[in-house]
Each structure stands twice: as structure tokens, then as C-alpha cells.
Image (tube, rainbow, N blue to C red):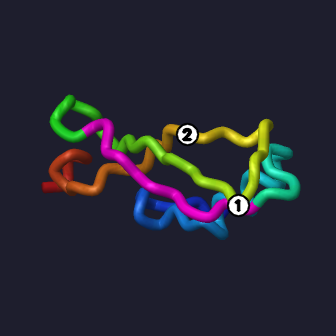
Amino acid sequence: MNDWPRSSTAVSVAWLGDVMRRNGLLSDARITSVATADLGTGVGLMGEVVRLTLEYDRPSPQAPSTMIAKCPARERASIGKA
């Protein structure tokens, strides 16, 4: 999958909805918002780890309300390229 986001800020409603549809997690509902909460700052992780909180335009029992996303480190020092 070449279109994978390189950071949590690149996770869009459209991209996530498409991925979830392709994988059978979303059918009729649409994602209306994706909020992020940083889970990894200052705990020795080598990448960006965030909780994604999703909201939908209608109930969708098979679709998750939260997900965890791990992306490459934002800080060059975290990946040994200071």
C-alpha cells in the first residue's frame, strides 16, 4: 500500500474510510471526523504512536470507535539522524 500516511496528521477521513471499506470494517456509514491523541511522547518509543478516535454519520456496529496508529518518528534525533 503506497499511500500509507507517514504521520498521524496525514491520516484523513477519506483515506481512513477507504482503507476501512476495503477491509470490510465499514459499509454504509461514513467517517465524519478523526481526532488524534499522542500516546508516545517521552516514553522511549522510536516512532509516533497515537490513538485515533473516529466519529461516524450513523451507527456502524462493526466499525471501531478508536484505533491505534504507529508512524515513523517525527523527530530526526529519535531515529538516530540528529
The N terminus, quarter of image: bottom right
**Mark carried by residue 72:** none
The percent position of residue 35, horizontal first and vertical second, equals 45, 55
Closer to us: 45 or 37: 37
Q: Residue at x 59, y 60 (%)?
A: 4
Q: Is residue 56 above or below residue 9?
A: above
Q: How many marks?
A: 2
Residue at left offset 55%, top offset 40%: 66
Graded by Cα atoms within 10 Å as few (under 14), some (14 to 19) or many (20 or more), the crowding at tag 1 reads: few
Q: Foreground mark, 1 or 2?
A: 1
- Viewed as shown, does residue 19 lie left or right of 47? right
Q: Give whichever of 1, 81 is nearer the camera.
A: 1
- Residue drawn where x is 13% and y is 55% of the image: 82
| Callout 1–callout 2 Cβ contact below 8 Å | no
CA gap, disc 1 and disc 2: 18 Å
Most distant residue in the top direction: 43
Q: Is residue 51 magenta?
A: no
Q: Position of residue 21 (x, y in %)?
A: 81, 55
What's the residue at 21%, 30% (across, down)?
44
Residue range in magenta is 30-40
Residue, far left: 82
Is 7 on the left-hand or right-hand side of 17? left
Q: Main secondary structure of the magenta part?
A: strand
Indicate left or right for 67 with 62 as reference. left
Helix, strand or loop at label 2? It is strand
Residue that badge 1 annotates: 57
Question: 56 above or below 43?
Answer: below
Residue lying at the far front in this picture: please name it: 58
Does dot 1 land on a helix, a strand or a loop?
Answer: loop
Up-down: is 21 above or below 48? below
Question: In the image, what residue type sits under mark 1?
Answer: Asp
Q: Which mark is residue 67?
A: 2
